[in-house]
Amino acid sequence: MTMTPSTVEDVREAVVGASGTLLIAGAGTAADWGAPAAPADTTIDTTGLTGVLRYNPADMTIAVRAGTPLAEIQRELAEHGQRVALDPARAGQGATIGGLLATADAGPLRTGYGSLRDLVIGATVVLADGTVARSGGHVIKNVAGYDLAKLFHGSLGTLGVIAELVLRLHPVPRAEATVSAACSAEDGFAVANRIIAAGLEAAALEWCAEPGRLLVRLEGTAEGVAERARAVCALADARVLTADEADQEWAAVAAIAVGDPGATVLRIGTLPSAAPRALGTILAAGASVTSSVPVGVHTVLTRAPGELLPVLHHEFGAAVTVLRRGGLDPSSAWGPPPPAVRVMRAVKRRFDPDDRFGAGRFAGWLDEEERAS
Amino acid sequence: MNSAEFVAALGADSVLADPVELRAYECDGLTGFRVVPSLVLLPRTAEAVADAVRICAREGIPFVARGAGTGLSGGALPVADGVVISLQRLRSVVEIDPVNRRAVVEPGVTNLDISRAAAPYGLYFAPDPSSQQVCTIGGNIAENSGGAHCLKYGFTVHHVHSIDVVLPDGTTTVLGGDSPHLGGYDLLGAFIGSEGTLGIATRITVKLLAKPAAVRTLVADFPSIEKAGDTVTAMIAAGIVPAAVEMMDAVAIEAVEAAVSAGYSRDTAAALIIELDGPAAEVTTQFAEVERLCQDHDATKVRIAADERERALVWKGRKAAFAAVGRISPNYIVQDGVVPRTSLATALARIGEMAAAAGLRVSNVFHAGDGNLHPLVLYGDAAGELERAEELSRSIAELCVDLGGSLSGEHGIGTDKACSMPRQFSEDDLATMARLRAAYDPDGICNPGKVLPTPRLCGEKPGVYRPHPLEAAGVIDRI
């Protein structure tokens, strides 16, 4: 059965009214993330849970229902010269803001602005027993109470339904430019560090392969961006792209994260300085890659995951996430759990003691010995 | 309490049991609440912290972690039948990694010492609470500390990669990782700002930033707080994100000038400190724009810091503001409420009315960019104004909630505001927060009585202030 709630109260009624297991589905752009969800008795479809609840541009915050597509929020904000400083590839496919929080997704702007965990300032969630809980609020600066939104960042629908979110906003920059510097992965890391050390405040520093190049995205005033672009060109073998060229480059970066039906897409976190070696391994396996160099987050598209994934799991453990399974054996989606998996299980037990939400998404991580005991 | 087990595990020189020595730990920066702990432990290593917590877990002894004790909400207030675990001896900067721009530090390292250690590499640690010379990184993590520059740079939670934690059962784990990407729930994010109730951080990897290429600072005087507020609104509407925007009213300026002579105008109704930083070309362009916006909003004087010395003086005045108020009032209470920025004028007008009705003075020093108010309620204890001041202070915090804001922007809930939490959160909200806490600390021994209201602390009716039994008995009191 599928329920399509349109308000928090509807969500609560759906959760309380249904018996058995629940699967939360948004726009479906990340249905393939992690391990496959087990078949559930009821699907809670959040695509009707949409709309802006409160937006006062002068406060630079917005409250929305969590099923609202990010692209739709961005359109509304753009009219007021504002934005959510987040550019995940899935936004173009209609990904919802709640789904983006549940998957901890982000795009190249993660270098300058972080991911949704850094932009969400309030959340309303519905737990398995129908409890409606709110944390944070409508103000950017707020330390009252625990920040429940953080728990739901990366929760893949296993803790409860994200029903409403409050986001902090940033101004749409008056000007922007992308500079492309031809370089190997190793040099890309060095060039990125030089740009950072020079205080040029790049919003994105993305290294791409085939051919190797570092894309430097600058945002600011027209004069400022022009001068900073010149400064980047002085630090590397680089040139400023035309607006069309820049659009194409960033679309190519997004295409890797989205993948295509036959492909497997992975995301890997490493120490930034470990990137050149990790990228070497990935490229040697014939995969495509795009890398947010300064933060050490790499997105990989491969058609031979059976060989590459075990190597990456061995080296990077829980910092490897499957974004698209493609031909991958579903049972191998997750590698070793993070060190704090015991705490993760304890949180899961407190929030969803009957295991109603998202069974299977974390495969063995959530249901090992301690859950059985 | 029998100290033998702790002495056996940590060594006699790491256990304080002498009542005179214990007194030094009876409160933090919120000095109105005082409880003498049974023991104070001073472990030298992360292993010793875990040993101590294991004993606490086994014996059911409540424990309270403590850094420098500068917190302003009673977050490190001891528990009478419990121990204080001081992290003051874990104060080594383990590593500066300039290539990955991060530092590995122990929890007792002061906020400013991280930036000092990073300075030779052109790097610094961005969160800058006013107490940064003495407050510790462990405390910053507990409180999710901000500071004047958090408008642009965010809070402690945005600047930590990973933490080694001793959990309340005495086991250890690591939250976070080498990069922001790690499978599973963001347990690191949930831990930061948990006010010492989920465990003890024993080793922290923080993010370091490259020093900005340019910094420009000005102080602008305005004929009214409203005009100053409008300037901030105009700046934000223009898409400018300043590194910091601070406002001070006439009472605060009077106090600061009396204390440190920072060169603020004594005859102005309000002053804004505006700082921009970033790439030189951006700062130059936007700073000119900010100056123009100040003039457009009837600024009576704009003083631009000519050099680093003048800039430091401007900030010295702002950072000394709380202490300086001691010059003009025998006692004061610091509030920390937040309102949506667009409600600033309403909030300040209401605070003014409430102060007048209470017959007390309120001085306003605040982070104008993010709506974080720091009203200082001035009173004289000797004049018998304490009760009125307390009432006014609580009303101001609750006014912030009613205007859609928060009880606390950076000082934390701690002991001080736990009983006001039901004003901001429903019973279900609080019960859900309690689930998170119980996931980490099922036995409730880790900094008990803080953050969430308890019947013992607040009386059976949540939301209504009742004196604590110890308060009624005269054992503790509120300033």
Image: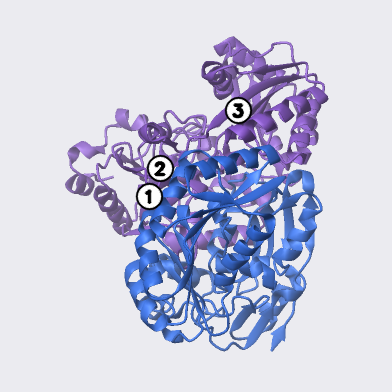
Quadrant assignment for the N terminus of chain A: bottom right
Chain letter of the residue carrying label 2 = B
Q: Residue at x 59, y 44 (%)?
A: A229
Q: Amino acid at mark 3?
A: Ile
Task: Give the CA separation, mark 3 to mark 1.
Answer: 29 Å
Secondary structure, mark 3, is strand
Q: Residue at x 63, y 66 (%)?
A: A251
Closest to the camera, between mark 2 and mark 3, is 2
Q: Amino acid at mark 2?
A: Gly
- Residue wearing tag 2: B138
Looking at the picture, tell me which residue is in the foreground, A234 or A145: A234
- Residue wearing tag 3: B333
Secondary structure, mark 1, is strand
Which of the marked residues, 2 or 1, is nearer the chain's N terminus? 2
Q: Which chain is blue?
A: A
Query: Does residue B342 lie above or below B305 as drawn?
Result: below
Q: Estimate the x, y position of residue B56 in percent, counting from the top left.
A: 31, 53
Task: Give the CA separation, mark 2 to mark 3.
Answer: 25 Å
Query: Tag on residue B200?
Result: 1
Chain letter of the residue carrying label 3 = B
Q: Estimate the x, y position of residue A51 in percent, counting from the top left.
A: 79, 65
Q: Amino acid at mark 1?
A: Ile
Label 2 with label 1: CB-CB less than 8 Å: yes
Which of the marked residues, 2 or 3, is nearer the chain's N terminus? 2
Residue A162 in sight = no
Q: Estimate the x, y position of residue B355 in percent, counting from the top left.
A: 75, 26
Looking at the picture, tell me which residue is in the foreground, A271 or B55: A271
Q: Quadrant of residue B264?
A: top right
Query: Does residue A54 lie above or below B249 as drawn?
Result: below
Colour assigned to chain B in the rendering is purple
